[in-house]
Image (cartoon, rainbow, N blue to C red):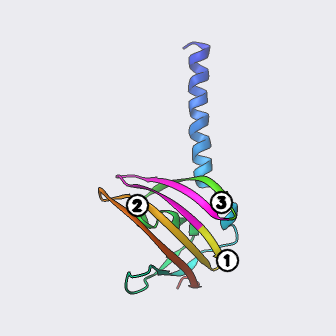
Amino acid sequence: MTGVGKLALIGAGGAALLLTLAAAQRPASLANVEGGQFEIDQIGAGPRPKICVTDPMVFASYEHRNKTCTRVVISDGPNGAVIHYTCTGGGFGRSTVKALTPRSLRVETQGIADNAPFQYVFQARRVGACG
C-alpha cells in the first residue's frame, strides 16, 4: 500500500472515530438535565405515558427509542440542540431538543419510521427518579 493509500485509510478511520465521539457527546444545552422518570405530553395524543431514561438524549430519537441509534449533534445553542440520528434496521430522524428547565424538555422531531414519515412536538417533564 502506498503512503497516500495509508494516509487515506488513516484519515477515514479518524473521521469514523470523530463521528463516533461526536455522537456520544451530550450537547452543552442539555448538560443540566438528568435522567429519571419522565411524563410525555404530546398535544392531542391521549394519555401521558411515563418512561424511565438514564440519558435524556434518548428524547432526540424518541420515535425509535426501542432501537439502537447513532446520534450526531448538528448544532447546540440557546434555542436547543439539533440532533440527527440513524438507527440499525432502518429509520432516521432529526430533532430539536430544548431544555426549558432542568426537569422539562421540548422536542420537535421528524423523520422516517416503519417506512412512513412522522413529525410531532412533545414535552418531556421529569416527575421523579426511576422506580
* SS for callout 3: loop
Q: Quadrant of the N terminus?
A: top right
* SS for callout 1: loop
Residue at left offset 57%, top offset 33%: 13
* SS for callout 2: loop
Cβ–Cβ under 8 Å for marks 2 and 1: no
The image's mark for residue 32 is none
Residue at left offset 61%, top offset 61%: 81
Q: Horizontally, is 67 left or right of 23 in the view? A: left
Observer-side mark, 3 or 2, equals: 3
Q: CA distance from mark 2 to mark 1?
A: 26 Å
Q: Amino acid at mark 2?
A: Lys
* Vertical comparison of 81 with 130: above or below: above
Observer-side mark, 2 or 1, equals: 1
How many other residues sit within 10 Å of disc 3, few (<14), some (14-19) or many (≥20)? many
N-terminal of the two: label 3 or label 2? 3
Q: Horizontally, is 114 left or right of 25 in the view? A: left
The residue labelled by disc 1 is 102
Give the x, y percent position of residue 123: 52, 77
The residue labelled by disc 2 is 67
Q: CA distance from mark 3 to mark 2?
A: 21 Å
Q: Which residue range is magenta in the image?
A: 79-97
The residue labelled by disc 3 is 27
